[in-house]
Amino acid sequence: MSFMSEFKEFATKGNVMDLAVGVIIGAAFGKIVDSLVKHILMPLIGLLLPGEQGYLGWKIAIGAKEVPYGLFLGEVVNFIIVAFAIYLFIVKFLGFVMKAKEAAPAAPPAPSKQEVLLAEIRDLLKAQKA
């Protein structure tokens, strides 16, 4: 097989396509959470705490330099929300689905030809004794 045909076969497998869709949805989810944190949650927190520009104005001056710790706190809140959402989906929801699959009793397998013959022999021997 040529390199291109091997790559085409690899790229069109179901798992690769599922992974690509998951990455795209994950990136979009990250942007939504980022917007939630930057435009709704942190400004609300900024209203409660002092600062002219809300959390954007939270800075520590060290000599002539300023360290914008408010931006860092915004990113920490962003991370916590994403991590919590992933925890809920991966650990809780998929764990529940996996347990539900395991809890469903599997039907016993059909008896093999050998077992069927042995059962017939047993039944014939019982009939002869009776």
Image (cartoon, rainbow, N blue to C red):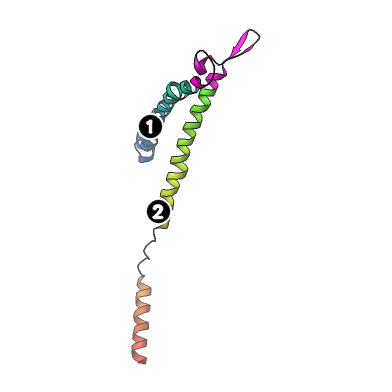
Q: Quadrant of the C terminus?
A: bottom left
**Residue 126 coordinates in the image, percent (x, y):** 36, 87
Above or below, comparing residue 92 to residue 108 in the picture = above
Looking at the image, which residue is at 34% across and 80% down? 120
Residue in view at x 40 percent, y 53 percent: 101
- Of residues 126 and 62, the one nearer the viewer is 62
Q: Is residue 1 visible?
A: no
Residue 55 belongs to magenta span: yes
Mark 1 residue type: Ile
Q: Residue furthest right?
A: 63
Instruction: Give the residues in magenta.
Output: 46-72
Name, please, the residue furthest toward the bottom.
Answer: 130
Is 107 magenta? The answer is no
SS at circle 2: helix
Residue 25 is marked as 1
Name the residue located 46 percent from the left edge and 37 percent from the top edge.
86
Picture residue at 36% right of the left edge, 78% below the top: 119
- Mark 2: amino acid: Lys
Mark 2 crowdedness (10 Å alpha carbons): few <14, some 14-19, many ≥20: few
For label 2, the residue is: 101
Q: Secondary structure at mark 1?
A: helix
**Residue closer to the observer: 72 or 58:** 58
Location of residue 6 in the rendering, given as x and y in whole percent from the top left corner: 37, 36
Please state which of residues 109 and 56 is positioned toward the viewer in this rendering.
56
